[in-house]
Image (cartoon, rainbow, N blue to C red):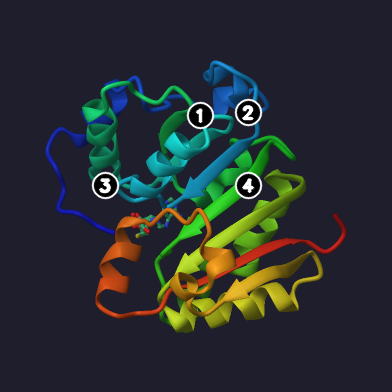
Amino acid sequence: MRLRNIPGADEAIAQSPYCIQDAAAYTGKWHTLFPQRAPLHIEIGMGKGQFIMGMAKAHTDINYIGIEKYTSVLLRAVQKMEAEETPLDTLRFLCFNAEDITEIFAPGEVDRIYLNFSDPWPKDRHAKRRLTSSAFLDRYDQILAKGGHIEFKTDNRGLFDFSVEEINASSTWQIEALTYDLHNDASMNAGNIMTEYEEKFSSKGNPICKLICNRISD
Ligand code: SAH
């Protein structure tokens, strides 16, 4: 998602109480941002934040961090948070490129990672940039707690098949559950919260794929 550059977005993010400014300072102590110590779930590439805000409302016993690399996109999420009658104190946003995610979370600090409608990077030479590439799976291995898992949704079948192959080729990860038609899979769809892209693409008739993966050894 790349919105037109929005003048003032950088400043608005830098001043927002809902955005984390000095991420590296929280390594190993992210829980101090929240009223209570609780499992930490993150979404990488959260876009305008509909999914993670819905999750934070539905699961008040979890702490959430939504990560997005563009301030112009993140600003939309901040505006949604500001429009809430009661801002969600279990959700904070971070403008950050997930390529460096191991620099800001301590080993095992994250309990779950959500990836939703990640950029497909269709050219082979860009495969390493895909958020489900082996390069990223290795980074997730460093920050994810024992027993933690990754949940990935997309309507892009090429990206989904690539992701399944990367997981199957890995000696660390395994697929725990998978569907090629989430909205018609009662058990996997239970409690599903739609993202902006999920609403948009499913309304065009695209089936949504979802997988959950965990570590082979956990
Ligand atoms: N999850 C949202 C948005 C999907 S678009 C939804 O489902 O509606 C993918 C988003 O991921 C874009 O906003 C893009 O800027 C962000 N993104 C892509 N690569 C990223 C990275 N390396 N780090 C952080 N965010 C990233």
Residue 89: image tag: none
Q: Quadrant of the N terminus?
A: bottom left
- Residue 132 visible at all: no
Q: Residue at x 64, y 27 (%)?
A: 38
- Mark 1–mark 4 Cα distance, whole angstroms, equals 18 Å
Tell me whether circle 2 and circle 4 mark residues in contact (CB < 8 Å): no
The answer for how far apart the CA atoms under marks 2 and 4 are is 16 Å
Q: Amino acid at mark 4?
A: Arg
- Front position in the image: 111 or 206: 206
Q: Would you name the residue on which mark 2 appears?
A: 27
Residue at label 4?
Answer: 112
Image marks 2 and 1: residues in contact by CB distance under 8 Å: yes
Which residue is at a point 52% across and 80% down the rendered structure image? 180
Q: Amino acid at mark 1?
A: Ala
Which numbered disc flags the more N-terminal residue, 1 or 4? 1
Ligand 1 - quadrant of the structure image: bottom left
Q: Which mark is residue 23?
A: 1
